[in-house]
Amino acid sequence: MSLYKKTLGHQGEEIIVEYLRKLGFTILCQNYTSKFGEIDIIAKNKDVLAFVEVKFRKDSKVYLSDLISYSKQQKIIKTAMIYISHEFQQHPLKNKHSHTVYRFDVALLHSVQQKIELNYIQNAFTATNSNTY
């Protein structure tokens, strides 16, 4: 991956972190990795735990939503399951009575004439049907 793409990706993640904080989310983790892949942002707000994939592009020739393939969704889901499992092992009493809603969100950022446009999609895909957005 080029330095330019890494810098652009990091910039996009920071924009989304700020966006989520303004919505009342607490950022639990950024760039969580497992043997299956990576989740850009994991954030919690009350009973919602959001696993967020961030895509930021300056080139508009490709639809941003097309960048998150079915196989990428599966990697995010498997990585989320590892995160959830790890959290239950670390905090069994805290999670015993939890009614957490797990959500897979996608944040699409696009730079247009020096202005950043955001399309934030809640529940962009699910663990049972990973091609719904």
Image: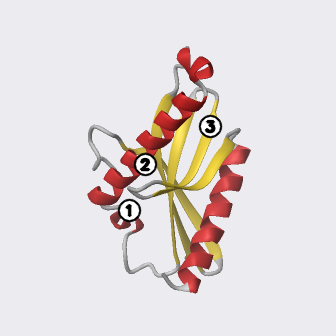
Query: Element at badge 2?
Result: helix
Residue density around tag 3, few if under 14, some if 14–19, many if 20 or more, within 10 Å: many
- Judged left or right of residue 62, residue 88 is right
44 and 133: which is toward the camera: 44
Crowdedness near tag 2: few (<14), some (14–19) or many (≥20) residues, C-alpha within 10 Å:
many
- Residue type at mark 1: give it: Ser
Which residue: 67% across, 61% down?
Answer: 15
Residue drawn at point x = 67 percent, y = 46 percent? 27
Image point (37%, 46%), residue name: 78
In the displayed structure, 72 sits above or below 21; it is below
Residue 126 place in picture, x, y as percent: 35, 41
Q: Position of residue 131 (x, y in %)?
A: 28, 50
Residue picked out by circle 3: 44
Secondary structure beneath dot 1 equals helix
Residue 68, percent from left and from top: 36, 61
Which residue is label 2 attached to?
79
Q: CA distance from mark 1 to mark 2?
A: 20 Å
Which is more N-terminal, label 2 or label 3?
A: 3
Which residue is depicted at the point 26% across and 41% down? 129
Mark 1 vs mark 3, CA separation in Å: 23 Å
Asked if the residue at tag 2 contacts the one at tag 3, i.e. Cβ–Cβ closer than 8 Å, the answer is no
Please tell me whether mark 1 or mark 2 is closer to you in this view. Answer: 2
Q: Is residue 103 visible?
A: yes
| Pointer 1 with pointer 2, Cβ within 8 A | no
Disc 3 versus disc 2: nearer the observer = 2
Q: Give the secondary structure at mark 3.
A: strand
Residue that badge 1 annotates: 65
Tag 2: residue type?
A: Thr
Residue 9, percent from left and from top: 57, 71
In the current view of this chain or complex, which residue is farthest to the top?
97
**Marked residue nearer the N-terminal end (1 or 3):** 3
Residue 122 visible in the current orientation: no
